[in-house]
Each structure stands twice: as C-alpha cells, then as structure tokens.
C-alpha cells in the first residue's frame, strides 16, 4: 500500500498517471481500486491517531482526482467500487459513473442494480452486456435479456464479438439503436420500482418516466417460469393519471390512472430469463 496521506507520495502517484494522460488524447480512465486497506500505518501520525488514516486516505484520493479533472477537464473518470467499495456521493463529484460489480451476470445484476438504484441515479451505474456462460456463475441468459438489463445503466459490451454466436452478433446493432433511442429517458427520467426479483424470486420490473410524464419505459424480466401461469398484472407507477398513453407495438390507448390502478397484463414468456420492454408515449 502507498501511504497517500503523505503529500510527497500523492505527488509522485499523481505524476505517474498525469504523465501518461499528457502523452496522448486520452478521454476516459477506469480507476480500479481492487485492494482493501489492511495493516496500515503512517509515519506522519502518532500511534494514538492511526484511526484517522482511513479518512485521511479517502481525502487524499479525492485530492488526486480533483487535480486530474482540473488539469484534464475533458477526462471521464469511471471509478470501480468492487475492491474499494468507493461508491459514494463524494466520489461521484469527480467520477460521474462507477462500476457496480465485476459480477456481470444479467440475473445477478437485477439485484445489484436494484440496490444501487435505491440511492444513486441510473446514469452513474456502469452496466455491460457480457459473455455467456457467465464467468462468475456460469449462467446462460439470452443476449436480448442481457441488453435489457444493461440498459438500466451506462450500457456497453464486455466480450469478444468475434467469438460470440452469429445470432447474438447480429443483435448488437439493434441493441445499440435501442440504447440511443432510450438513453436520454434512462439518464434523465425518474426511476420507479414495480416488482423486486429479490423479494418474489420469479420476476423483476422497474421503469423510468420523463419529468414531463409524456414518456415512460418499463423493463420486465421473467427470471423463473412457472407452470400454468398465463400472465402477470403489472400496476405501473409514475404516470400522469390524466394523460392518455399508447403502448408501442400494441393497439389501444389508456389513461395513466388505468395503467397505475388496473395495470396491464404481461403474457407469460416461454422459458427462464426472458425480458421485454414496455414503451409508453402520450397520445
């Protein structure tokens, strides 16, 4: 461990990073923190004040990142919470997005992203479509579903496109178009939790609604199928009860009040780990 609470150590570490950033047109840095603070001590503090070291260390990291964005104002810093668990409002001041977890399995991510979204906006959550069988749990989920789950974050790909099935590779342009279609809504809309897979163990549902209530996008993921279960009724949230909406790809219109109180039926998909998007616009 480097004792970043010492100014000369901070200066040295900063220059190591800044020298590389000055050498080329670098616009993005992933700042990984996969090391817990253990067996720490500092010659700068007396023995009875060593407990301050954790706090001083975090302030030192803040100072280094402040220097970076001052010298390189167009730099996007993405911090990693995995090892350091440094996903906090103070860090988001310097790094507007943070990698939630190296656990990229889409079904695992439903729980991870639900917990993160309780406090942090979707725009701050790093989320990727990764390869299957997943490297963490060995689970195989449809490429389409992986895209839906990654949409509730910064969206990206974490795989070798030359090694995935041709069917999945052909889906990438469609998913990228999906991202561009809904990105502003996901990034700026209000987030609503409809159902929690962590609680019911069968399906997950959440949505984002534009500030003016004219557009909404809900994501439904069936985690586990059940026999003789024809449909689920979802009572949507966040809509204007007086506005009239249409659901993309379906006929008919509904008031926001009907959609929130009576809800809509979602036909039971065939198989596990199946998802769909429900896009509403005001008529």
Image (spheres, helix red, strand yellow):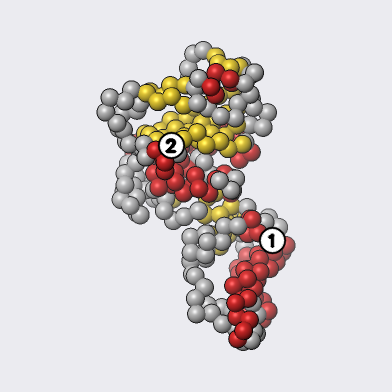
The residue sitting at 59% across, 48% down in the picture is 120
Residue 109 image point, x, y percent: 44, 47
Left/right of residue 66 with respect to residue 232 in the rendered view? right
96 or 241, which is in the foreground? Answer: 241
List the residue tagged with mark 1: 69
Residue 276 image point, x, y percent: 43, 30
Residue 233 quadrant: top left
Left/right of residue 244 with respect to residue 140 in the rendered view? right
| 10 shown above or below 133 | below
| 277 shown above or below 102 | above
Residues at marks 1 and 2, CA–CA distance in whole angstroms: 38 Å
261 or 256, which is in the foreground? Answer: 261
List the residue tagged with mark 2: 204
Residue 148 appears anywhere in the view: yes
147 or 6, which is in the foreground? Answer: 6
The residue sitting at 46% across, 49% down in the picture is 112
Residue 67 image point, x, y percent: 70, 66
Instruction: Identify the secondary structure beneath mark 2.
Output: strand
């Amino acid at each position: 461990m480097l004792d970043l609470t010492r100014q000369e150590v901070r200066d040295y570490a900063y220059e190591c990073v800044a020298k590389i950033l000055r050498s080329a047109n670098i616009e993005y840095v992933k700042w990984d923190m996969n090391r817990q603070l253990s067996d720490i001590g500092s010659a700068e503090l007396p023995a009875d004040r060593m407990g301050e070291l954790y706090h001083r260390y975090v302030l030192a990291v803040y100072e280094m990142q402040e220097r970076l964005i001052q010298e390189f104002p167009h730099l996007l810093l993405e911090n990693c919470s995995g090892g350091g668990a440094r996903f906090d409002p103070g860090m988001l001041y310097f790094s507007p997005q943070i990698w939630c977890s190296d656990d990229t399995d889409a079904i695992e991510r439903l729980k991870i992203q639900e917990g993160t979204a309780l406090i942090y906006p979707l725009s701050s959550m790093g989320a990727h479509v990764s390869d299957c069988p997943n490297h963490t749990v060995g689970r195989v989920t449809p490429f389409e579903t992986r895209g839906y789950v990654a949409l509730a974050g910064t969206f990206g790909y974490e795989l070798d496109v030359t090694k995935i099935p041709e069917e999945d590779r052909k889906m990438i342009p469609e998913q990228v178009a999906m991202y561009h279609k809904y990105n502003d809504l996901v990034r700026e809309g209000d987030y609503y939790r409809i159902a929690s897979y962590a609680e019911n163990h069968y399906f997950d549902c959440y949505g984002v609604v534009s500030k003016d209530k004219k557009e909404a996008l809900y994501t439904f993921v069936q985690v586990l199928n059940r026999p003789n279960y024809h449909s689920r009724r979802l009572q949507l949230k966040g809509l204007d009860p007086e506005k009239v909406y249409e659901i993309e790809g379906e006929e008919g219109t509904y008031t926001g009040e009907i959609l929130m109180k009576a809800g809509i039926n979602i036909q039971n998909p065939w198989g596990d780990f199946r998802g769909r998007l429900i896009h509403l616009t005001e008529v």
